[in-house]
Amino acid sequence: MLKAIFLGTGTSQGIPVIACECAVCKSFDYRDKRLRTSIYIETDLVKLVIDTGPDFRQQILRERIKELDAVLFTHEHKDHIAGLDDVRGFNFVQKRDMPVFARKNVIDALHREFSYIFSENKYPGIPRIEITELTNEPFEINGERITPIDVMHYKLPVFGFRIQDFTYITDANYISDQEIEKIKGSKILVLNALQKEPHVSHFTVDQAIEIVKKINPEKAYFIHMGHRMGKHADVEKELPQNIHFAYDGLVVEL
């Protein structure tokens, strides 16, 4: 069993974008209201989130998530780590430190951005985390095997993650053939697709579709969309039958 809840599906600015008057930002369709990208995954063995962006608290409250075994980080950009402080709610309820899994450059960024968490003289009530450094090798949480997928976000290395036959990749514009092989066999692929126009560090819709064709999952869902993509109801019609734009609150299961 695997259940995934899309906590957020928007790019770093979210949608609506501050001060923007475009049709997407003014849309009344709930699918066009996108918080920063993050996902909750639950299996028989583990409950985890991938990334804690600026909207983490709001997302967790919206989905009424009461338990969390771990946090996985894809990379260190602010729209993916800014909400880490709010794991302290789980610290209080679960009476333990929160396991955090990330590669070294992300851990270094956490030390800079959340220096008070790592201070020798810890202030009462700060988040309590237990960090495990990841390499590009499979690891386990509570017996659930997780395989990192090493991708590039322009010049920044980013980890995607495969859990069972579910693969999640955000903020990428290049995936090597070697890493593609690790994704093949996935029944569900989640992949970033920022917009239709070319971008220096994100897949376009057409580029993302080509990746999906290489991997050939049963279903694929696009995330990390910007307002330039267009309205959900309009652009969804342009996708191949087995590909969909995800939206905040969407639940998928294996």
Image (cartoon, rainbow, N blue to C red):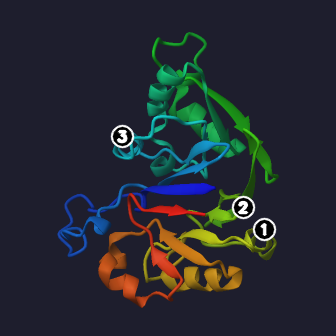
Q: Quadrant of residue 253?
A: bottom right
Considering only order in the chain, which callout, 3 or 2, is on the residue closer to the N terminus? 3
Q: CA distance from mark 2 to mark 3?
A: 29 Å
Q: Where 52 sits versus 86, above or below?
A: below
Q: Residue at x 41, y 42 (%)?
A: 60
What kind of residue is marked 1? Answer: Lys
Q: Residue at x 46, y 35 (%)?
A: 66
Q: CA distance from mark 1 to mark 3?
A: 34 Å
The picture places residue 125, in percent across and down from the top left corner, at 45, 16
Q: What type is the residue that disc 3 sits on?
A: Leu
The circle drawn on residue 149 is 2
The residue depicted at 43 percent of the width and 83 percent of the height is 196
Residue at 36%, 55% (x, y): give it: 35
Answer yes or no: do the residues labelled 1 and 2 have beta carbons within 8 Å?
A: yes
**Residue flagged by tag 2: what amino acid is it?**
Ile
Indicate left or right for 254 with 193 as reference: right
Say whether disc 1 or disc 3 marks the residue closer to the N-terminus: 3
Provide the residue designation for mark 3. Answer: 61
Residue topped by disc 1: 182
Q: Quadrant of residue 128?
A: top right
Give the x, y percent position of residue 131: 68, 32
> Mark 1 or mark 2, which has the lower sequence index?
2
Q: Nearer the viewer, residue 173 or 59?
A: 59
For the residues labelled 1 and 2, the Cα–Cα distance comes to 7 Å
For the residues bearing labels 1 and 3, Cβ distance under 8 angstroms: no
